[in-house]
Image (spheres, rainbow, N blue to C red):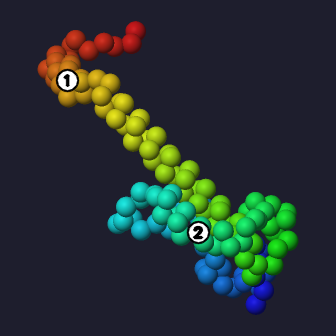
Amino acid sequence: MTQQNGPPKKGGPDADNAEAHPTSTNPSAHQNSAGSRQVSFWSVHQFVEPLLTAVGTWPMAGSVEWCLLDDDDPVKVAALYDAAQHWALHLELNQEARAEASKAVSGAADWPKIAREIQEINNFRASRPWATRVAS
Protein backbone atom coordinates (compact mmCIF):
# COMPACT_ATOMS: atom_id res chain seq x y z
CA MET A 1 0.00 0.00 0.00
CA THR A 2 1.38 3.42 -0.91
CA GLN A 3 1.47 6.31 1.52
CA GLN A 4 -0.31 9.52 0.61
CA ASN A 5 -0.38 13.06 1.89
CA GLY A 6 -3.76 14.19 3.17
CA PRO A 7 -7.07 12.37 3.48
CA PRO A 8 -8.04 9.61 1.03
CA LYS A 9 -9.47 10.72 -2.29
CA LYS A 10 -13.00 9.70 -3.31
CA GLY A 11 -12.82 6.50 -5.27
CA GLY A 12 -9.16 6.05 -4.33
CA PRO A 13 -7.55 2.86 -3.02
CA ASP A 14 -8.66 3.61 0.53
CA ALA A 15 -12.22 4.68 -0.34
CA ASP A 16 -13.68 1.51 1.18
CA ASN A 17 -11.67 2.12 4.37
CA ALA A 18 -12.52 5.81 4.94
CA GLU A 19 -13.14 5.21 8.64
CA ALA A 20 -9.44 4.43 9.06
CA HIS A 21 -8.61 8.00 8.02
CA PRO A 22 -10.50 10.45 10.25
CA THR A 23 -10.96 13.79 8.53
CA SER A 24 -12.55 15.73 11.37
CA THR A 25 -11.31 19.32 11.65
CA ASN A 26 -12.51 19.55 15.24
CA PRO A 27 -9.34 19.34 17.37
CA SER A 28 -11.29 18.43 20.50
CA ALA A 29 -12.70 15.36 18.74
CA HIS A 30 -9.31 13.69 19.20
CA GLN A 31 -8.70 14.79 22.78
CA ASN A 32 -9.47 12.84 25.89
CA SER A 33 -12.38 14.80 27.34
CA ALA A 34 -11.65 13.48 30.83
CA GLY A 35 -8.03 14.69 30.84
CA SER A 36 -6.40 18.06 31.14
CA ARG A 37 -6.24 20.28 28.07
CA GLN A 38 -3.12 22.07 29.33
CA VAL A 39 -0.26 22.02 26.82
CA SER A 40 3.44 22.14 27.72
CA PHE A 41 5.73 23.41 24.96
CA TRP A 42 8.83 22.45 26.94
CA SER A 43 7.77 18.81 27.22
CA VAL A 44 7.20 18.63 23.47
CA HIS A 45 10.50 20.41 22.78
CA GLN A 46 12.44 17.97 24.98
CA PHE A 47 10.85 15.04 23.15
CA VAL A 48 11.56 16.28 19.60
CA GLU A 49 14.95 17.93 20.23
CA PRO A 50 17.12 14.78 19.80
CA LEU A 51 15.68 14.04 16.34
CA LEU A 52 15.84 17.67 15.27
CA THR A 53 19.47 17.91 16.37
CA ALA A 54 20.35 14.69 14.52
CA VAL A 55 18.71 15.87 11.30
CA GLY A 56 20.08 19.41 11.44
CA THR A 57 17.92 21.22 8.87
CA TRP A 58 14.55 20.57 7.25
CA PRO A 59 12.04 22.36 5.04
CA MET A 60 8.81 23.87 6.33
CA ALA A 61 6.18 21.16 6.83
CA GLY A 62 3.72 21.23 3.96
CA SER A 63 6.02 23.16 1.61
CA VAL A 64 6.69 21.90 -1.91
CA GLU A 65 10.17 20.79 -0.86
CA TRP A 66 8.69 18.87 2.07
CA CYS A 67 6.03 17.22 -0.12
CA LEU A 68 8.69 15.97 -2.53
CA LEU A 69 10.57 14.13 0.25
CA ASP A 70 10.08 10.38 0.65
CA ASP A 71 7.60 9.59 3.43
CA ASP A 72 10.27 7.59 5.28
CA ASP A 73 12.86 10.39 5.12
CA PRO A 74 13.88 11.52 8.65
CA VAL A 75 14.06 15.08 7.31
CA LYS A 76 10.32 14.94 6.50
CA VAL A 77 9.55 13.61 9.98
CA ALA A 78 11.80 16.28 11.56
CA ALA A 79 9.78 18.98 9.79
CA LEU A 80 6.61 17.57 11.35
CA TYR A 81 8.26 17.42 14.77
CA ASP A 82 9.32 21.03 14.41
CA ALA A 83 5.80 22.04 13.36
CA ALA A 84 4.42 20.13 16.35
CA GLN A 85 6.64 21.97 18.81
CA HIS A 86 5.70 25.31 17.27
CA TRP A 87 2.02 24.41 17.54
CA ALA A 88 2.52 23.41 21.21
CA LEU A 89 4.18 26.78 21.83
CA HIS A 90 1.25 28.55 20.17
CA LEU A 91 -1.24 26.65 22.34
CA GLU A 92 0.70 27.27 25.55
CA LEU A 93 0.99 31.00 24.87
CA ASN A 94 -2.71 31.13 24.04
CA GLN A 95 -3.54 29.37 27.32
CA GLU A 96 -1.43 31.87 29.25
CA ALA A 97 -3.07 34.81 27.51
CA ARG A 98 -6.55 33.45 28.27
CA ALA A 99 -5.63 32.93 31.92
CA GLU A 100 -4.34 36.50 32.20
CA ALA A 101 -7.47 37.85 30.48
CA SER A 102 -9.65 35.83 32.85
CA LYS A 103 -7.83 37.29 35.86
CA ALA A 104 -8.21 40.80 34.44
CA VAL A 105 -11.96 40.38 33.89
CA SER A 106 -12.39 38.80 37.30
CA GLY A 107 -10.66 41.72 39.02
CA ALA A 108 -12.28 44.44 36.90
CA ALA A 109 -15.49 44.68 38.92
CA ASP A 110 -17.31 43.50 42.02
CA TRP A 111 -19.21 40.77 40.18
CA PRO A 112 -21.20 39.49 43.20
CA LYS A 113 -22.43 43.06 43.79
CA ILE A 114 -23.41 43.45 40.14
CA ALA A 115 -25.27 40.12 40.26
CA ARG A 116 -27.17 41.26 43.37
CA GLU A 117 -28.12 44.56 41.68
CA ILE A 118 -29.39 42.75 38.58
CA GLN A 119 -31.40 40.36 40.75
CA GLU A 120 -32.89 43.30 42.69
CA ILE A 121 -33.93 45.00 39.44
CA ASN A 122 -35.47 41.76 38.14
CA ASN A 123 -37.32 41.24 41.42
CA PHE A 124 -38.58 44.86 41.35
CA ARG A 125 -39.87 44.48 37.79
CA ALA A 126 -41.46 41.09 38.52
CA SER A 127 -43.36 42.50 41.51
CA ARG A 128 -44.43 45.64 39.57
CA PRO A 129 -45.35 44.58 36.02
CA TRP A 130 -47.05 47.93 35.49
CA ALA A 131 -43.62 49.63 35.89
CA THR A 132 -42.01 47.72 33.02
CA ARG A 133 -41.19 49.91 30.07
CA VAL A 134 -43.02 49.15 26.84
CA ALA A 135 -42.02 50.30 23.38
CA SER A 136 -44.49 52.79 21.98
Considering every residue shown, the one lying at the far left of the view is 127
Q: Amino acid at mark 2?
A: Val
- Whole-Å distance between the Cαs marked 1 and 2? 50 Å
Q: Earlier in the sequence, mark 1 or mark 2?
A: 2
**In the rendered image, the vertical position of residue 30 relative to residue 108, given as above or below:** below
Determine if residue 6 is in view. Answer: no
Q: What residue would you read off at disc 2?
A: 48
- Does residue 67 show up? yes
Marks 1,2: beta carbons within 8 A: no
| SS category of the residue bearing label 1 | helix
Q: Position of residue 23 (x, y in %)?
A: 63, 69
Residue at 52 percent of width and 52 percent of height: 91
Q: Residue at x 73, y 67 (%)?
A: 56
Above-or-below relation of 9 to 114? below
Give me the residue at 48% from left, 63% from top.
43
Density class for disc 1 (Cα within 10 Å; few <14, some 14-19, many ≥20) is few
- Given residues 107 and 51, the one toward you in this image is 51
Q: List x then y, in percent, for residue 73.
A: 76, 78
Q: Amino acid at mark 1?
A: Lys
